[in-house]
Image: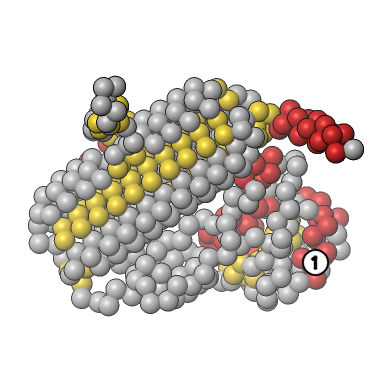
Amino acid sequence: MEDPASGPASALLEPLTTIGDPPRYEGDGHNREELPPERQPEGGNFQHDHDQPEHLALHVPIVGEDAKNIAQLSFAESGCYTRCMKRTVKEVAELVDAVLVGDGNAEVSGIASLRSAKPGDLVFVEEQKNLAPALQSAATAVIAGPFAGRQVIQKPLLLTEQPRRAFARAAKCLNEAPPVASGVHASALVHRTAKLDKTVAVDENVVIREDVHIGRDTWIGAGCVIGAGTKIGRSCRLHPHVTIYPGAVLADRVVVHAGAVLGSDGFGYVRDAKTGRYEKFPQIGRLEIEDDVEIGANSTVDRGALDITRIRRGTKIDNLVHVGHNVDIGEDVVIAAQTGLSGSAVVGNQAIIGGQVGIADHVQIESGAILGAQSGIPSKKVIRGKGVVFWGTPARPIKQYLKELAFLAKLTKEDLE
């Protein structure tokens, strides 16, 4: 078992400011902002692209719907998702590594879909058929693929091989929020042994237990509870009412959305063969979350039973996902909503898991595999095939699955006749 003092989380143990009687601010809690997630508006109605099977598998674009202002909450000051700074189109092109065609001095200050675009907005298109509507829209500039290079220039174009990714990056630079104001709210309870960097922001009614370490520029939203011995790295964002059980480790730039529960006991019981009663199996392992992971609202991640539950660098988990004990999720994995991973499942790097997928215990999903929505994976099964879409229950390659459906439809038709 890796010691966090010598592993990837060692940066969390650098000297921090110990807060016995932490600094207080007496504001109304509405003067601080979150750094919003990288979920950007979708342009028009989403259509599955068969050249990108990950879109087909997820059934929704990886980039989510328009975020909306939520008034009267300290974690979402009015406008925090829509406040934009002005940049020239040339600046944006440089930031997203796109080729600029047209007037680079034009200014953009926001992002939008094709339907809602107005002057000053930036939009994107991935297909030739959507280019004309984009050019006719009120948007000031358009991010598009190389196919747009032959068009008569009606407005500035930013040409790139990956318009969606460029749009997400542009949105991030246009929506840069000011740093979160540091300080600990007067209603928060911080144990005298906790160590918080002086740049940490702690909102209303937060509870921080003993021996917690929190790194610089991290924000703890209202109502969060952080268990004893937890280590949280730099520039993390914990939205309101996140609960972290004792001993969990979160590395740098981890985002956890409202209501998530991290490090709770796994579902492990032993049945007495004589009485039929269940006795709890020890759940004394740990939870480790690496850099740049994002965990959606109301998701739950169990601690290990005897070892470690681990979510590796760059993985993105949607809302209402359950990760069982001893699960090991690789790097840059995407998991859509309402998926469940049972104990000791292993997911390889860059796998894509659609919504409502059920993964049984001790399953192995190898790197790059794609599980379509509502797939079911039986215990101890191995799924392999980089870029291959698997569908159905039990999950099998989609070509095989569709052939079986066609055959069954033919038999049914013959029976009816």
Q: Position of residue 210 (x, y in %)?
A: 14, 48
For label 1, count other residues whose C-alpha is less than 10 Å away and answer few (under 14), some (14-19) or many (20+). Answer: few
> Which quadrant of the view contains residue 283?
top left
Of 98 and 398, which appears nearest the observer?
Answer: 398
315 above or below 189? Answer: above
Say whether residue 310 is left or right of residue 194: right
In the rendered image, residue 26, in percent from the top left (x then y), is placed at: 20, 76
Q: Quadrant of the N terminus?
A: top left
Closer-to-camera residue (246/102): 246
Q: Residue at x 28, y 31 (%)?
A: 278
Expressed as whole percent of the image width and height from the top left, the position of residue 319 reads: 47, 52
Find numbered disc 1 in the image and state the secondary structure of the residue it sits on: helix
Residue 172: image location, x then y, percent: 53, 59
Report the label total: 1
Residue at the image point whose x is 85% and y is 38% from the top: 416
Please state which amino acid type lies under the numbered disc 1.
Pro
Nearest to the observer: residue 348 or residue 341: 341
* In the image, residue 79 above or below residue 341: below
Question: Residue at position x 27%, y 31% from top?
Answer: 277
The colouring scheme, among rainbow, by chain, secondary structure or one colour, is: secondary structure
Position of residue 127 in the picture relative to residue 124 (left or right): right
Residue 14 appears in view: no
In percent of the image, x 52 and y 69: which residue is there? 68
Q: Which residue is mark 1?
A: 133
Residue 224 as seen in the image, left or right of residue 99? left
The C terminus is located in which quarter? top right
Q: Is residue 272 visible?
A: yes
Above or below, 157 relative to 374: below
The answer to which image quadrant residue 242 occupies is bottom left
* 327 shown above or below 354: above
